[in-house]
Every structure is written in C-alpha cells, then in structure tokens.
Image (cartoon, rainbow, N blue to C red):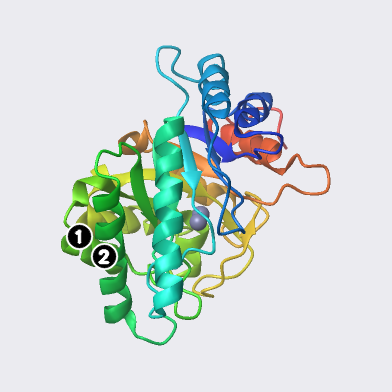
Amino acid sequence: MGYLGAHVSTAGGVARAFERAAAIGCDALQVFVKNANAWRAKPLEATTVDAFAAARAVTPGRDVAAPLPVIAHASYLINLASPLAETAERSREALLDELRRCDSLGVDALVVHPGAHVGSGPDAGLDAVARALDDVFARHPDGRTRLLLENTAGQGTVLGADLAHHTRVLRSVAAPERLGVCLDTCHAFAAGVDLRKPDGYEAFIEVADAAVGLARIMAWHLNDSRFPLGSRKDRHANVGAGELGAAAFLPLLVDPRFERVPMVLETPLGDDDQGHARDLVTLRELLSPQPSAT
Ligand SMILES: [Zn+2]
Ligand SMILES: [Zn+2]
C-alpha cells in the first residue's frame, strides 16, 4: 500500500501540519505552503523552516528510518496555460515562489494543475504550460522539489483531463526530469475513467503508463466524486459517500507498484472536522475487513 494520508491545515504555522497529520494517523501529508487563494505571501522565515524540519523529524511515519513524505498543492489561482500576458506572468512568478518555498522546507513534490486555455485552444494552452515550466525551472535551476502535474476533471477549458496532455508537456519541456504526475481518482472518474469496473483501474494504469510512465506517478489524490462518471465536474466526496464508492479504491491501495507513493485525501472535512480521519479508517478497513461487520 502507498503512504496513506491527507491534506492537512497549516493554520497557526506550516509546522503545525505534522501534529494534525499524526493525530489522524497519516503516513504522508499534503499542505499549502502559502494561502492557496492569494497571489502573494510574505517570505518564509528561517524560524518557520526550522520549526517545519523539527516537527517533521519527530513525527512518526510508516518508515521509521525515513522522513514522513510531504507534498504541497500549489495555489488555485495559478494558470500556466493562460493566453493573457498578465495572468501568465503572475502565474509563473507565483509558481516560482511556491517551488522555492517547497525547496526551503524540503517538501518532496509540489502539485499543480496544468491550467485552462480559456479559449486559445488546447494546443496553444499546452505550449504555454511548457514554456512557463521552462522559465520557472531556468530561474530556479537547483531545485530538488519535483513539480507534479495533476490530472483534472476537464471542466470548461481546463487542460489535463486527458493524460495525452501530460505526455505533450513532458515531451516539450527542457527538463522533464524535474516533472512528475499526480493522479486524482475523483478527477479521473469525472473525466470518464470508470474505476468502479473490475478492469477499470488496470486499464487506467495502462493508459497512464503509456502516457507518462509509471515511475513518474509520484502522488495520488484519493477522492470520491460527488458527480457521476464523465460529468467533468470537480467535486470531491468522502470515500464511499460518492459515485465511485469505497470498493473502487481497493485495487489502487493494494497495488505494489505504488507501495512507496504518497496517497492523500482531499475530501470534505465535515462539520466536526473529522472527514479525513473517517476516510482513513474506511480505506484501512478495505485492506483488513472487520469480521464483525454485518
Ligand atoms: Zn489539485
Ligand atoms: Zn486532487
């Protein structure tokens, strides 16, 4: 099984994420390294970086000998595919800043959406994404944090519902070794991949392998979907409470090819804030069904 975890809040400081992750039994976590709904943020202070490293070092994970896997999700404002010069420029600056923050913190990977072409068409959009990534990597040449392009539900003019888009970006950037892919189960399902079918998961993995190579799949987002197959709507549901259903997650959870890949929940927290805790229990019960269950 992969490293199971969740997107956790950094309220009170980014280092606070670890105590929240530990409280619900995460073996991996995802955070925002700045306010995801703002373009700018004040620079990270040395004390913040130190506190993050210290908290990570004392948080037990599945691997006692290795640090807890940590990934970050980039701001939702970033649109690397934008045909508008101002948005494109702001997006590059914002992504560069996030990548630098991740590197300062020692975050393993930063997940970003390819973006939306907003009318310029997929070809122009994907070219814009590749040029933006070239620019960002050139301005941060020694970065170690991997940038992961997520698959999307494909709403509106959003790119990345089809993994052929990821193939194309990988082939047209100067430094593909700095890129990876993050696969989101809700987005795949909303984009038309029927993960409920017995062979649905395997077929998806075959497509992903051909498109980007399995070694590049460096994170998973475990989300159920509020809307049906092919709806192209990006609305996450708690595991088992959506159209996918809990059983659809099992083939992924037991796939030895993703044994060392972070798999994080981005599901609703609910009124009591315990949504991720419950979803982790649901996922772990799939792996070891309780005999008392009726
Ligand atoms: Zn995302
Ligand atoms: Zn996601």
Based on the displayed image, in which of its 4 quarters is residue 143 positioned? top left
Mark 2 residue crowding within 10 angstroms, few (<14) / some (14–19) / many (20+): many
Percent of width and height locating residue 38:
60, 58
Mark 1 residue crowding within 10 angstroms, few (<14) / some (14–19) / many (20+): many
Based on the displayed image, in which of its 4 quarters is residue 84 positioned? bottom left
Q: Which mark is residue 92?
A: none
Compared to residue 90, the image places residue 231 above or below, namely below
Picture residue at 40% right of the left edge, 12% below the top:
65
Residue at numbered disc 2: 130
Q: Which amino acid type is shown beneath numbered disc 2?
A: Ala
Q: Nearer the viewer, residue 181 or 207?
A: 181
Q: Which amino acid type is shown beneath numbered disc 1?
A: Val
Residue at the bottom extreme, as displayed: 119
Compared to residue 280, the image places residue 137 above or below, namely below
Q: Secondary structure at mark 2?
A: helix
Quarter of the picture containing the C terminus is top right
Q: Nearer the viewer, residue 86 or 55?
A: 86
Report the side of 70 relative to 36 (left or right).
left
Comes first in the chain, label 2 or label 1: 2
Compared to residue 280, the image places residue 245 above or below, namely below
Picture residue at 39% right of the left edge, 41% below the top:
109
Residue at numbered disc 1: 173
**Cα distance between the residues tagged 2 and 1:** 5 Å
Q: Are dots 2 and 1 in contact, CB under 8 Å? A: yes
Percent of width and height locating residue 29:
53, 35
Based on the displayed image, in which of its 4 quarters is residue 251 positioned? top left
Percent of width and height locating residue 93:
42, 58
